[in-house]
Image: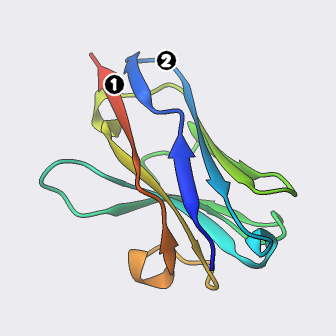
């Protein structure tokens, strides 16, 4: 098992940047593919980005491609660098861990509690 804790959310103006972090407990962090998802009020949880267990592959949703960047270190943390933020990026952001390198919530087994990102216009 792995426990995930997100941090780094907050309020930012449109065009600004934030970096989210997701710290994983346990010694099995490197066995998991990692993903970031987000959920806005009244909407379903949607895929944002994913990174493979060896960091060799990354994948992004179309709305964030070119603006967001996912990375991970060899210890226990995955990051989401968010640039050129837009009001429509406002959501609770969740990190997730799983055996599959997927784009749907069902493909991930472990989830953090989420961190709020609010982008003002």
Q: Name above or below for residue 63 compared with residue 121.
A: below
Q: Residue at x 53, y 33 (%)?
A: 8
> Which residue is at the far left?
42
- Image position, residue 32 (x, y; %): 70, 76
The residue that label 2 is drawn on is: 16
Q: Name above or below for residue 78 compared with residue 35.
A: above
What color scheme is it? rainbow
Q: Camera-side residue: 60 or 73?
A: 73
Q: Camera-side residue: 58 or 62?
A: 58
Query: Which element carries disc 1, helix, strand or loop?
Result: strand
Image quarter in which the C terminus is found: top left
Instruction: Please indicate whether residue 59 sits to the left or right of residue 31 in the image.
Output: left
Image quarter in which the N terminus is found: bottom right
Q: How many marks?
A: 2
Q: Name above or below for residue 87 compared with residue 34.
A: above
Q: Residue at x 73, y 70 (%)?
A: 52
Mark 2 in CB contact with mark 1 (< 8 angstroms): yes
Query: Mark 2 or mark 1: which comes first in sequence?
Result: 2
Q: Name above or below for residue 9 compared with residue 111.
A: above
Query: Which element carries disc 2, helix, strand or loop?
Result: loop
Mark 2 and mark 1: Cα distance apart in space = 8 Å
- Image position, residue 98 (x, y; %): 59, 79
- Image position, residue 93 (x, y; %): 41, 48
Instruction: Please indicate whether residue 69 sits to the left or right of residue 90 in the image.
Output: right
- Image position, residue 109 (x, y; %): 51, 81
> Which residue is at the far front?
26
The residue that label 1 is drawn on is: 119
Q: Residues within 10 Å of mark 2 (few under 14, many from 20)?
A: some
Q: Residue at x 53, y 47 (%)?
A: 6
Q: Residues within 10 Å of mark 1 (few under 14, many from 20)?
A: many
Q: Residue at x 31, y 36 (%)?
A: 90
């Amino acid at each position: 098992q792995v426990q995930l804790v997100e941090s780094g959310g907050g309020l930012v103006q449109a065009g600004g940047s934030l970096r989210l972090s997701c710290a994983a407990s346990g010694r099995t962090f490197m066995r998991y593919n990692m993903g970031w998802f987000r959920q806005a009020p009244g909407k379903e949880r949607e895929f944002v980005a994913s990174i493979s267990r060896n960091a060799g592959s990354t994948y992004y949703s179309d709305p964030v491609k070119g603006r967001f960047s996912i990375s991970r270190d060899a210890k226990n943390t995955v990051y989401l660098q968010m640039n050129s933020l837009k009001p429509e990026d406002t959501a609770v952001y969740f990190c997730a861990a799983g055996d599959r390198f997927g784009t749907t919530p069902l493909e991930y087994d472990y989830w953090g509690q989420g961190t709020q990102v609010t982008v003002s216009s």
